[in-house]
Structure formats: C-alpha cells, structure tokens
Amino acid sequence: MRLLARCLSALLLFLGSTGYAADYSATGTVNILRTRGFLPGVESDSLSLAGVDSLWTCKPDEAGHVVLLLPHGKGGERMFELALASKTSGTPLTIWTNDTVTAASGFCFVSYIE
C-alpha cells in the first residue's frame, strides 16, 4: 500500500511539473529568414533574430542562433510576410514560442508575432 502511495505521489509530481507549458518571447531584428527546405530535414519556413542565441530550450542552428519555425498554412504565410517586412525595414519584432511544441528536427515553432 505504501509503495502504491509513493508511485501515485511520484506520478502526480511528474504530471504537475510537466503540465504547465509556458510561452517565451524574444525581440530583435530578423537576422535570417529561410524558406522551406533550407535546413536539412526541416520542411518549414524559419527565422532567427539577431542577438537571440538562447530561448529557453529552443534548439540553435550550427552558428548558434535560435531557429524558430513558422507553422504551415495561411497563419505561417502571414508570419513569413511580417518577418520579411521587418527584415526589409530593419524594424524589430517580438516572437512568442512554446518550447514544448517542436518539430521532429527539435526546432521550436513560432506561436505568434507582434
């Protein structure tokens, strides 16, 4: 009975610690804007922000910059257009990501852009 209680306590502790996903943000100018297929094994458009070399547990590329993937579909297309306008004008933008939502490549997806 005590073993069962310990197992249940450990399970509740584990579920409680992983159940709270958080969004993280970073602000900067667009350093690199990539189209689909630029990175091996990555089939999404992606971007990196100048000076953002770490963002919680999001994976960096070989150069050490955090790579953020844009989702597929119209929402991702709009994000790409906004990122392109930001890169062209040099205007900083803020991206938000949830580091628990990643692609098979390990890169984080952008949740939204301001």
Image: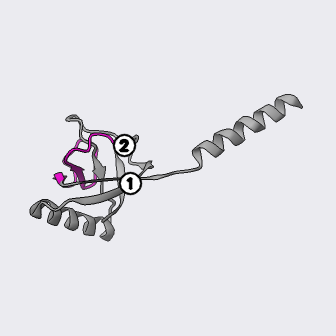
Identify the main secondary structure in magenta.
loop
Q: Position of residue 104 (x, y in %)?
A: 39, 44
Q: Is residue 25 above or below residue 104?
A: below
Secondary structure of residue under mark 2 = loop
Q: Is residue 77 left or right of residue 33?
A: right
For the point 20% across and 67% down, which residue is it? 81
41 and 67: which one is in front? 67
Q: Which residue is mark 2?
A: 58
Secondary structure of residue under mark 1 = strand
Q: Which residues are magenta?
A: 30-54
Which quadrant: the C terminus? bottom left
Residue 55 disc label: none
65 and 101: which one is in front? 65
Q: Is residue 30 left or right of residue 12?
A: left
Residue reaching furthest to the left = 88
Query: Label 1 is placed on what type of residue?
Result: Thr
For the point 38% across and 54% down, which residue is it? 97
Q: Which residue is mark 1?
A: 97
Q: Position of residue 17 (x, y in %)?
A: 61, 42
Find the distance from the CA under tag 1 to the CA under tag 2. 9 Å
Q: Is residue 26 left or right of residue 20?
A: left
Q: Position of residue 61 (x, y in %)?
A: 25, 38
User: Mark 1–mark 2 contact, CB under 8 Å?
Assistant: yes
Q: Is residue 106 left or right of residue 33?
A: right
* The stretch drawn in magenta includes residue 85: no
Q: Position of residue 12 (x, y in %)?
A: 71, 42
Mark 1 and mark 2 lie on one chain; the one further toward the N terminus is: 2
Image quadrant where residue 94 sits: bottom left
Query: Label 2 is placed on what type of residue?
Result: Cys
34 and 43: which one is in front? 34
26 and 73: which one is in front? 26
